[in-house]
Every structure is written in C-alpha cells, then in structure tokens.
Image (tube, grey):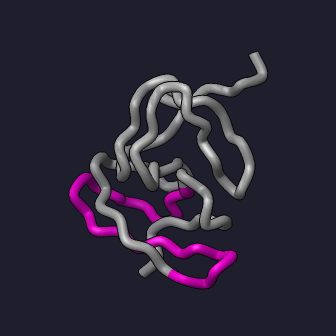
Amino acid sequence: MIHFVLHDPADNVAVVVVEGVKSGAELTGWVMDDDRTVSLTARQDIPIGHKIALKDLAVGDTAVKYGIDMGRIVAPIQAGQHAHVHNIKTKRW
C-alpha cells in the first residue's frame, strides 16, 4: 500500500494520500519520477492531503515538494513528522 507520494527524488516533504496515518505507523511512499518506493515511520498522526517530512529539517531550511520551493521552515521538523502551516511559512512575505 502507498501512504505518501513525492514527485522528485530531491523532495524533502511528501503528500499523505491515505486516511488514518497514525504515529508509529510504518509507511511506504512512491517516488513518481523514479517509479520506486521508500519507507518512513510516522512520528505524528498526519491527515490525508497534508505533508510529511522525509528528512530532518531545521529552521531556515526550504521545504521542497514537486521539485519546487514550497516555503521556509519556521520550526524544526523531524523525518516522519507533520509538515504544515504550523512549521512551514511562505517566503513571499
């Protein structure tokens, strides 16, 4: 079963595509550009459609999704944690 999807192998966040992701769950992700899978343990509950961090991200890092800049990390995020508006902000303002 695929739990999250990322397009570009350089992405550091991916989209959860199933409901019910719970902390501690072993997840499988599909890297679309490579047509391969990766594994990750969820560290938090994550709603469908929200992002999961694929690696540890520090304040000031850039969130990359679909191979593009999605914003600036404003609070540390560990691999497997929920990545959303509480820890990622736009760089526009």
Q: Which of 10 and 80 is in front in this view?
A: 10
Horizontal side of 57 relative to 69 (left or right) equals: left
Picture coordinates of residue 50 (x, y %)? Answer: 52, 48
Q: Is residue 42 above or below residue 86?
A: below
Residue, far right: 92
Q: In this view, does 86 lie above or below 46?
A: above
Find the magenta span and give its range: 14-36
* Residue under the point 36% across and 59% down: 20
Q: Which of 2 and 13 is in front in this view?
A: 13
Q: Does residue 85 appear anywhere in the picture?
A: no
Q: How many marks?
A: 0
Horizontal side of 12 relative to 80 (left or right) equals: right
Horizontal side of 55 relative to 11 (left or right) equals: left
Q: Nearer the viewer, residue 24 or 12?
A: 12
Residue, far left: 24
State which quadrant residue 77 falls in. Answer: top left
Q: Does residue 78 appear anywhere in the picture?
A: yes
* Residue under the point 61% across and 37% down: 62
Picture coordinates of residue 33 (x, y %)? Answer: 69, 76
Q: Is residue 28 magenta?
A: yes
Quadrant of the image for the N terminus?
Answer: bottom left
Quadrant of the image for the C terminus?
Answer: top right
Picture coordinates of residue 41 (x, y %)? Answer: 29, 61
